[in-house]
């Protein structure tokens, strides 16, 4: 029973409150049984992880990782009911060490009377290392069953010691089918259909962005806005609800997931997917100059010399954005992205650089061969610096074929261009120079 339910009618009257005040739709539709939770069949279906745990009537500590509005809090509460554990909830945003001590002490007393405690910690990643460590003793001795909820990657945000004592379960964003189930339940409770045509309903489900709570909040907005007999199309829906802010934290997983998707779409030569992720990031408020930097990187790493113009265009987009700003300059970013996505791909330069760096680190302080070193002093000249150097511009075809690697290091080949784009021409040059090098070596007596 909640505190509000315990209060007497006179208290509500004195405060001028209506104890039957309408509750938000999301609260009215909150599941009361685990089989009412939608979108998490991998956890709660017949063969789901949590279903198997409940078959044994016992729980270990858990970390629920997933985006907002996917049922993490609700499932934790229902798990406590199903296992007859006392449910205690705190938020890492508002709680400190003193609050944790009170919760742990209460759980110990409860345990002495034969009642276990499921402690649900919302935003558990916001606790610092010392606070996270304080959970370890009470988890180990069974004082509490910890269920932590986080929207951030636990591998990065939670202590290894805490993770080793808890199982991470991933909550998925609700797909269109799950959102549709919620909407049908909402329509049943409200006793009327959501006033949207077929296309607007599809658009509505996309606007929810996998968040069940947001979907129900948006549904309430639509019902409030609709006049009698009015049905909204997609354009009108957009006007009514404006735009829901995307779930996107520029410093956390949303940022890294989308930039990864953008980069891989470009690498995969899919300009349409790349544009989609570009617009997702811009729409969410990602700084355009950050995206420009990533496109420059793509031009270097994934296009390289297969199309040297890609780097020029990527840099030009950055300069154009600097000059025009938003939103006009964003078109230049989009054009650069399309160019890089449709350019021939080669990572030969990227691979060559990595291989050369490894050899350079291993070779240490090997000196270049003396014949390619300058001899600015008489002593250095007497030591052989510069002796035998052949000035390439004075040689046939401007190519001497000399050795430029240290004498103690065999000749290496790091760069192996593919026969794609401009690198096809580079490959021909390298093959021709390799042939000339062999001929020059023979002329020098196999030097």
Image: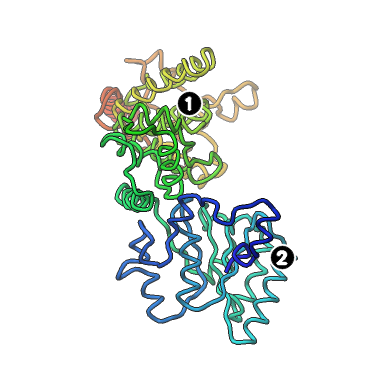
Q: Is residue 260 above or below residue 88?
A: above
Label 1 residue SS = helix
Residue 89 falls in which quadrant of the image?
bottom right
User: Looking at the image, can residue 136 be seen?
Assistant: yes
Q: CA distance from mark 1 to mark 2?
A: 46 Å
In the rendered view, tell whether residue 207 sits above or below residue 342.
Answer: below
In depth, the one of 318 and 115 nearer the eye is 115
Query: Which of marks 2 and 1 precedes in the sequence?
Result: 2
Residue 391: where, in percent of width, then height? 44, 17
Number of residues whose C-alpha sits closer than 10 Å to that of mark 2, classed few (under 14), some (14–19) or many (20 or more)? few
**Residue at point 69%, 53% (across, down):** 15
Q: Nearer the viewer, residue 71 or 260?
A: 71
* Point 37% across, 27% down: residue: 236
Please give the residue where the numbered disc 1 appears in the rendered image. 292
Residue 116 relative to residue 258: left or right: right
* Residue that label 2 marks: 99
């Amino acid at each position: 029973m909640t505190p509000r339910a315990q209060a007497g009618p006179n208290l509500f009257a004195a405060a001028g409150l209506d104890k039957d005040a309408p509750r938000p739709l999301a609260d009215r539709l909150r599941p009361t049984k685990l089989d009412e939770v939608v979108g998490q069949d991998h956890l709660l279906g017949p063969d789901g992880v949590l279903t198997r745990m409940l078959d044994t009537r016992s729980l270990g500590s858990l970390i629920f990782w997933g985006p907002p509005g996917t049922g993490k809090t609700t499932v934790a509460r229902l798990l406590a009911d199903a296992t007859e554990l006392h449910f205690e909830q705190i938020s890492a945003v508002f709680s400190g060490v003193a609050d944790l001590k009170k919760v742990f002490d209460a759980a110990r007393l409860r345990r002495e009377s034969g009642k276990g405690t499921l402690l649900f910690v919302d935003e558990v990643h916001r606790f610092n290392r010392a606070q996270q460590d304080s959970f370890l003793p009470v988890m180990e001795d069974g004082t509490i069953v910890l269920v932590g909820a986080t929207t951030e990657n636990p591998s990065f945000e939670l202590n290894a010691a805490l993770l080793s004592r808890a199982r991470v379960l991933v909550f998925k964003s609700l797909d269109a089918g799950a959102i549709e189930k919620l909407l049908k339940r909402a329509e049943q409770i409200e006793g009327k259909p959501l006033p949207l045509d077929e296309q607007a309903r599809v658009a509505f489900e996309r606007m929810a962005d996998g968040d069940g709570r947001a979907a129900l909040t948006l549904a309430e907005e639509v019902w409030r806005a609709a006049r009698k007999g009015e049905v909204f199309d997609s354009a009108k829906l957009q006007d009514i609800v404006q735009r829901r802010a995307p779930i996107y934290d520029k410093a956390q997983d949303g940022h890294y997931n989308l930039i990864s998707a953008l980069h891989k779409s470009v690498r995969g030569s899919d300009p349409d997917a790349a544009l989609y992720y570009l617009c997702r990031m811009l729409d969410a408020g990602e700084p355009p100059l950050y995206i420009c930097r990533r496109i420059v990187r793509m031009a270097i790493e994934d296009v390289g010399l297969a199309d040297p113009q890609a780097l020029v265009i990527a840099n030009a987009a950055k300069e154009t954005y600097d000059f025009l700003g938003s939103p006009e300059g964003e078109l230049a970013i989009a054009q650069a992205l399309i160019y890089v996505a449709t350019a021939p791909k080669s990572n030969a330069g990227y691979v060559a650089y990595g291989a050369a760096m490894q050899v350079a680190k291993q070779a240490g302080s090997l000196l270049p061969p003396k014949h390619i070193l300058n001899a600015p002093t008489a002593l250095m000249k007497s030591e052989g610096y510069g002796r035998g150097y052949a000035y390439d511009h004075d040689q046939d075809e401007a190519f001497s074929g000399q050795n430029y690697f240290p004498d103690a290091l065999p000749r290496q080949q790091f760069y192996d261009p593919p026969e794609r784009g401009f690198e096809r021409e580079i490959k021909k040059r390298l093959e021709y120079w390799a042939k000339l090098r062999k001929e020059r070596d023979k002329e020098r007596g196999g030097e």
